[in-house]
Image: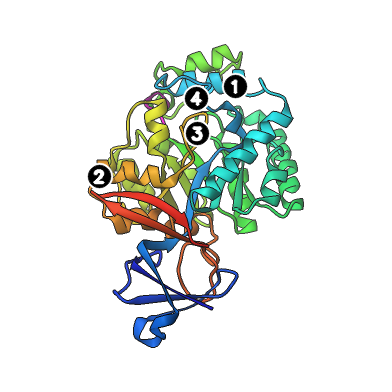
Amino acid sequence: MRFLKADKVFDGLVFLEPETVIVIDQTGCIIDVVACEKVANQAIERIEGIICPGFVNAHCHLELSHLERSIPQKIGLVNFALAVIQTRQALPEPEQLQAMERADAAMYSKGIVAVGDISNTTLSASIKAKSKLYYHTFIELIGLNPTRTEGAFEAGLNVLEAFQKSNVSASLAPHAPYSTSTTLMDKMAQYNAAQNQVSSIHNQECEAENIFLKGEASAFEKLYSTLNIPIDWFKPTATSSFQYYAPHLNANVPQLLVHNTFMSAVDAELAAQLNTRFCFCPKANLYIENTLPHFSNFRLDTFCVGTDSLASNKQLDVLEEVNELLANTSISVEQALRAITSNGASALQCHNQFGFIKSGFKPGLNVIQEQHHQLRFIKKWC
């Protein structure tokens, strides 16, 4: 056994009392958390800084890792989406896999232990199956036209089965309200409820999304016309994006709302009454739309954090994401650390393994430092 004592210990929820010692075995499993006086002084390993659980990246797109630095910044979501579609297959699969492996290793090196990852194909399954990280994969389904519901759902089930065969946790998820019909959302929600699985959706990432779903002219006309997708049949509801699809959220399915960049206080309050969690990806919001969510609209108690992809971010480092939050909100360091530990683990339903320093858990341990209300990663302890 080893006995670790740091300047501060964050257990996933709060900073513990001074003189706290973490007892771990040779595998990194937490044996106990005790007062220093209960341990022989000569056995204690002393650590400068804050020791905390391994980090959780609640929203990522590993499949897009090969697009690193290939898409210009601040071009808006519609132009960004078109660029992804047009360049996604520019590299052969072996090079795409190599990029995923590098991204996976980079996340591990930055203290991340668990990832909520979006996948449209089975390509990342082999990477995740052998990774040192825990992945929950959201199989993302697209199909705004209700006539595509059955085909899109069956295709999603085939991808889901491939991940399950690789022993990678996975569930179905709609891409976004502007690209997934409420009929398809209902079918996925029913399936996820039966499987007791979490889901995810890109929510109000740009103002054009709200405008489009109110039935007004928006940048999405450019998206669909460029892709030769007719939408003359689509009947908007004259509401905000979230209010458009909120009735189709199943109360038995925990839902991760990702981005929320243009979510109003009214919508945020409505979402808080449902079985939802907010996931913020501030660096990606700045990369794509050059703006941040109105954080004052949200109850910042159970939110989590993601990095989005290397197509929309310069790194996959959740500590850099919370530093952006610390610089632009009034949240405390405790709240910031909670977002990338226990809150993230709870959002991905892996909170019985990760996110907490408590007996029986093997959460990974990171050493960080705080200076001027910013956090710096020092090293992985185990």
- Residue 133 percent location from the top left of the image: 60, 53
Three-letter code, disc 3: Pro
Q: Which residue is mark 4?
A: 235
Answer whether labels 1 and 4 touch (C-beta < 8 Å): no
Residue depth check, mark 3 versus mark 2: number of the one nearer the observer: 2
- What is the spatial separation of the Cα atoms under label 3 and label 4, in whole angstroms? 13 Å
First reached walking from the N terminus: tag 3 or tag 4 = 3
Query: Quick one: label 2 or label 4, which is nearer the N terminus?
Result: 4
Mark 2 is surrounded, within 10 Å at the Cα level, by few (under 14), some (14 to 19) or many (20 or more) other residues, namely few
Residue appearing at x 61%, y 29% in the figure: 66
| Magenta-colored span | 205-209
Instruction: Residue 170 in the image: state x and y as whole percent.
Output: 64, 50
The mark nearer the N terminus, 1 or 2, is 1
Residue topped by disc 3: 177
Judge by depth and name the residue closer to the eye, 249 or 165.
165
- Residue sitting at 41 percent across and 17 percent down? 218
Distance in Å between CA atoms under marks 1 and 4: 25 Å
Residue that appears at 31% across and 48% down: 269
Above or below for 39 versus 110: below
In the image, which is nearer the foreground, mark 2 or mark 4?
Answer: 2
